[in-house]
Amino acid sequence: MKNEKFSTDEYNALDEVARGIKGRPSACVGRNTKRLSGLKMLSIARSGAITLTDKGREALFLRRCIMALRALTENQAVTLDADVALFLGKKSHIEQVEGGFAITEKGRASLADIEAQGI
């Protein structure tokens, strides 16, 4: 999954499918369904229902973690989702400080590596 780079439009399509599609899919989902299903991020049932796979959920979660690290570099008072904070804390990428969280050196190194890869 490291070599798979997604556009903002593709992430938006994954996010929309994660929220649930009621009725006809949007144009965003329609444009990206073929590629995302080929990468096993989406599953299409015989009835035409589009659902997010475990791999798709993981991609969205990792994106949320990266966005949280980027936000923490700018502002320590950023509110993080509990699951993201727990994951990044277990991986020693963030530490809890008074008034919020701070990014650790390991977190800065990981974020620099992510930026170097262009993700």
Image (spheres, rainbow, N blue to C red):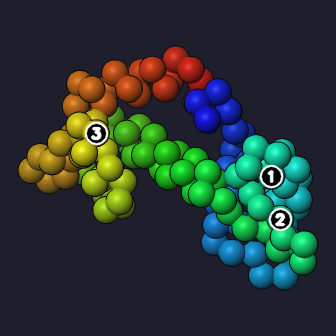
- The one nearer the camera, 76 or 29, is 29
Q: Position of residue 94 (x, y in %)?
A: 24, 40
- Check disc 3 and report the residue beneath it: 91
CA gap between label 2 and label 3 equals 34 Å
Dot 3: element: loop
Compared with 116, 9 (above or below) is below
CA gap between label 2 and label 1 equals 7 Å
- Check disc 2 and report the residue beneath it: 44
Q: Is residue 36 visible?
A: yes
The N terminus, quarter of image = top right
Question: Which amino acid lies under the numbered mark 2 shown in the image of this protein?
Answer: Ile
- Check disc 1 and report the residue beneath it: 37
Disc 2 to disc 1: CB gap under 8 Å: yes
Q: Which residue is farthest bottom?
A: 23
Tell which tag, 2 or 3, sits nearer the viewer. Answer: 2
Mark linked to residue 88? none
Disc 3 to disc 1: CB gap under 8 Å: no
Q: Residues within 10 Å of mark 1 (few under 14, many from 20)?
A: some
Question: Which amino acid lies under the numbered mark 3 shown in the image of this protein?
Answer: Lys
Question: Which amino acid lies under the numbered mark 1 shown in the image of this protein?
Answer: Ser
Which numbered disc flags the more N-terminal residue, 3 or 1?
1
Dot 2: element: strand
Quadrant of res 106: top left
Quadrant of res 80: bottom left
Compared with 81, 102 (above or below) is above
Dot 1: element: helix
Q: Residues within 10 Å of mark 3 (few under 14, many from 20)?
A: few
Q: Position of residue 83 (x, y in %)?
A: 35, 59
CA gap between label 3 and label 1 equals 30 Å
Q: Is residue 53 left or right of residue 95?
A: right
Compared with 105, 17 (above or below) is below
